[in-house]
Amino acid sequence: MSNFDFFYIEDFLNKKQIKQLLSFIEKNFDVVENKEHQALGKKTTTLCILYSKIKNMLNNIEHQVNNINEHNFGYLLNPINDFSYVLLNKYFSKDKGEYPWHNDASRSNFFDCKLTVQINLSEEKYEGGEFLLCNPVPYVVEKFKPGTLLVFKSFLNHKVNPVTKGSRKTLTMFFNGPPLR
């Protein structure tokens, strides 16, 4: 399903794949994101793992995202680097886990962040934690259930509302391309 700002594929991963992926990341992550380097107001635990360690578990995600990009966005994208980090964001109701309004960007002079890719890896039902995009007014992305692959333009402001019950888990990747000139 698509609109001008995002595209999603429901059931990109099934429950078994979600369980295997979460278990692998939680046992093999490379680093926990330092709270001092997180965005202001972000209340998550973020595990970072090299793409090379999990790419075989992601249903040929590069091909899927490149196809989505070609038919919906038209960005010039670089291949994913095996040494890029993939992020597992965990939002817990006990912490009122949330991620305030922000956009995804690069600090590099050599590439820009073009597309943000998320997969909902939540194993249990949760309340709150709605994902919102803003262009130009905020709206909730309704179909972001477990197993769904969501691709959206990185420059768009987006947020995750506080989780009020249970826990929400998402995998995040960034697809980069040449900088605007």
Image: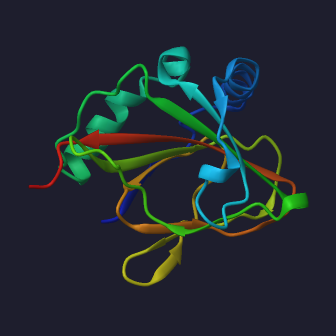
- Establish if 38 lies above or below 169: below
Residue 137 in sight in this render? yes
Is residue 10 left or right of 167 when viewed as pictured?
A: left
Name the quarter where the C terminus is drawn: bottom left
Residue 1 appears in the figure = no
Quadrant in the picture for the N terminus: bottom left
Horizontal arrangement in the rendering, residue 86 relative to residue 162 (left or right): left
Residue 100 location (% of width, % of height): 61, 69
Q: Is residue 12 above or below residue 128?
A: above
Q: Residue furthest front?
A: 36
Classify residue 17 by image quadrant.
Answer: top right
| Residue 152 place in picture, x, y as percent | 39, 55
**Residue 172 % position (x, y):** 53, 42
Image coords of residue 86 (percent x, y): 53, 33
Q: State the residue at coordinates (43%, 21%).
A: 83
- The answer to whether residue 128 is left or right of residue 138 is right
Report how many numbered discs are placed on residues in the image: 0
Give the image quarter of residue 14.
Answer: top right
The residue furthest left is 181
Residue at image point 35% right, 49% down:
106
From what the image shows, is residue 138 above or below residue 121?
Answer: below
> Residue lying furthest bottom in this view?
137
User: Which residue is found at the position 39% from the left and 59% from the top?
Assistant: 6
